[in-house]
Amino acid sequence: MLRKKVAFMTMVIIKTYEEVLKGIRVLADQTPLIKMKISG
């Protein structure tokens, strides 16, 4: 029972981590545009 819960939590954490990484990558792609808008 406990092992199943741990496995599930691990999966959730990994999925969340992947989503966060995706979000950071998107933000990193958009940052140059933001900087250009600020300086321009």
Image (cartoon, rainbow, N blue to C red):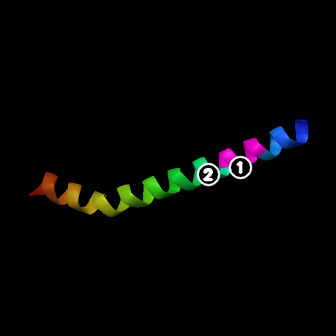
Picture residue at 29% right of the left edge, 59% below the top: 30
Q: Is residue 21 above or below residue 9?
A: below
**Magenta segment: does it hold 22?**
no
Position of 31 compared to 15: left or right?
A: left
Give 35 or 24, whichever is nearer the viewer.
Answer: 24
- The image position of residue 34, as x and y in percent, is 22, 55
- Residue 35: image x %, image y %? 22, 56
For residue 37, the mark is none
Few, some or many residues within 10 Å of mark 2 (<14, 14–19, 20+): few
Q: Main secondary structure of the magenta part?
A: helix
Q: Is residue 12 magenta?
A: yes
Q: Quadrant of the C terminus?
A: bottom left
Q: Against 8, is 36 above or below?
A: below
Which quarter of the figure has residue 37?
bottom left
Residue drawn at (89%, 36%), measured in percent from left and top? 2
In which quadrant will I find the N terminus?
A: top right
Task: Please tell me how crowded label 1 is: few (under 14), some (14-19), or many (20+) other residues with Cα within 10 Å.
Answer: few
**Which element type, helix, strand or loop, lies under badge 1?**
helix
Point out the stretch of residues depicted in magenta: 8-13
Q: Amino acid at mark 1?
A: Met
Q: Are marks 1 and 2 in contact (CB under 8 Å)?
A: yes
Left or right of 8 on screen, residue 18? left
Residue at disc 2, secondary structure: helix
**Nearer-the-camera pick, 19 or 27:** 19
Q: Which residue is mark 2?
A: 15
Determine which residue is flagged by label 1.
11
- Seen in the picture, residue 6 relative to 31 is either above or below; the reply is above
At 59% from the left and 47% from the top, the residue drawn is 16
Quarter of the view holding residue 26:
bottom left
Amino acid under label 2?
A: Lys
Give the percent coordinates (x, y) of residue 29. 33, 63
